[in-house]
Amino acid sequence: MIPSALPPPCAVLFVANVQRLARFYRELAAMGVVHEDEDHVVLEIAGLQLVIHALRGAPEPVADVAPKVREDSYWKLCLPVASIAAGRAIAASLGGHIAPPSREWEARGFRACDGHDPESNVIQLRELAA
């Protein structure tokens, strides 16, 4: 029997710079802060919690050295946004990148576009299809 009340689904992303990545995801996807301390920040949107957690022993990324950008990874966080275009601008202002409109595609009632966060973790933004 499944309990009637379960904790919300959660994903944990281990990063070198907790505050930078927490700000990136908070602003990009309008996520609320549930909890914050020096080694992790818990964000929440639409029934999903995202924990931005310090990767122990990871060196701080060098500011003027761009991380290696990947297109594929073992996992990709897909976030709902009101506007991919607005998300593209927010991501760029915070050190991430969302591919140009020519790389957007549609499926199952949404429009999507891939990109990456400031530490080169692969992400996808999704808006409702017109």
Image: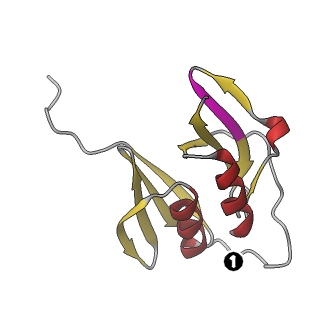
- Residue 36 vertical placement versus 73 (above, below): below
Question: Which residue is nearer to you in this view: 5 or 85?
Answer: 85
**Can residue 35 be found in the magenta stretch?**
no
Between 61 and 123, the one lying in front of the other is 123
Residue 75: which quarter of the image? Answer: top right
Residue 123 shows in this picture: no
Name which quarter of the figure residue 57 lies in.
bottom right
Q: Residue at x 60, y 29 (%)?
A: 129
Q: Which residues are magenta?
A: 109-113
For the residue pair 28 and 68, the one nearer the viewer reads as 28
Horizontal relation, residue 40 to residue 73: left or right: left
- Give the residue displayed 85% in from the left and 78% down from the top: 64
Left or right position of 1 against 20: left
Could you say whether the residue bearing mark 1 is in a helix, strand or loop?
loop
Residue 13 % position (x, y): 54, 56
Q: Quadrant of the C terminus?
A: top right
- Picture coordinates of residue 113 (x, y %)? 71, 39
Decide whether residue 111 is among the magenta residues: yes
Q: Quadrant of the rendered structure where residue 59 is?
A: bottom right
Place of residue 91 in the rendered image (x, y in percent of width and height, measured from the top left): 69, 60
Q: Is residue 40 above or below residue 98?
A: below
Specify the principal SS of the magenta part. Answer: strand
Counting labels gives: 1
Residue 79 in the image: state x and y as whole percent.
55, 44
Residue 119 left/right relative to 64:
left
Q: Amino acid at mark 1?
A: Glu
**Colouring convention used in this rendered image of the protein:** secondary structure
Residue 76 higher or lower than 59, as above or below: above
Q: Which residue is mark 1?
A: 60
Residue 43, placed above or below residue 8: below
Q: Residue at x 68, y 69 (%)?
A: 94
